[in-house]
Amino acid sequence: MTNRQLAAAETRRKLVEAAKNIICDKGLTNTQIEEITEACGVSKGTFYTYFKRKEDIVFELSEGMFDEILANAKECEGTIIDKLENYMIYFSGYIEKSSVKLAQEWIKNVVNPDISDVGINKMNKDLSALEELLQSGIETGLLKSSTPCRQLAYTINDLLYGQMLCWAMSGGAYSFEERTKEFCKTYLDTFLKQYLL
């Protein structure tokens, strides 16, 4: 990487970090782009070099981490149940650690696809990650070849998103990560039993 590319990557990282801090404190609606750029010591135009709108920052915050969550789940030793449990718990744990306020803002700003395609893009990415994880279970002999990976991915994603919504609606009154652990411990084996080898 050249010095210019390194500087650009650092500027982008600073914008994302500043936005996260401000959004978690004030909410996305009450956050102005000028506040983000001021916190980084850059011009407003610099923001638009990296992002089209402030809602894109919320997606950016999670992009790399969710790739890492999938990679860790695929590398996890054990059964496909262990791998899915790893994915689901780290997924919910990351969201919880990022803050309930950020989850609330993300939900509020992505439920209307007429405003932004960020929610659809994130959902499609999460569905693809789950499908890839399940498909790897077939390829490694952990799941039957007839396993309906796409349908199971939809169901698991619906569950995680539903849990996230309920947790966000509660204002973080309980642990999203712990609730996910309870589900995995109680139901995941039964849910996948007919597809296991």
Image: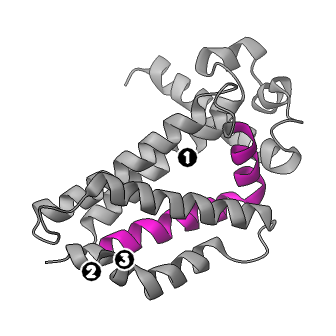
Counting from the top left corner in percent of width and height, residue 176 is at 64, 71
Instruction: Report the span colored magenta.
Output: 83-109
Find disc 2 in the rendering and name its residue: 193
Q: What element carries label 1?
A: helix
Q: Nearer the viewer, residue 34 or 67?
A: 67
Name the amino acid type tagged 2. Lys
Quarter where residue 77 is shown: bottom left
Find disc 3 in the rendering and name its residue: 191
Q: Which of 150 and 6 is in front in this view?
A: 150
Q: How far apart are marks 3 and 2 (CA)?
A: 6 Å
Which numbered disc flags the more N-terminal residue, 1 or 3? 1
The local crowd at label 1, few if under 14, some if 14 to 19, many if 20 or more residues have their Cα within 10 Å, is some
Find disc 1 in the rendering and name its residue: 62
Q: Is residue 77 visible?
A: no
Can residue 118 be found in the magenta stretch? Answer: no
103 to the left or right of 80: right
Q: Are the residues tagged 1 and 3 within 8 Å (C-beta)?
A: no
Q: What element carries label 3?
A: helix
Counting from the top left corner in percent of width and height, residue 109 is at 72, 38
Name the amino acid type tagged 3. Phe
Q: What element carries label 2?
A: helix
Tell me what residue is drawn at x 40 percent, y 49 percent: 127
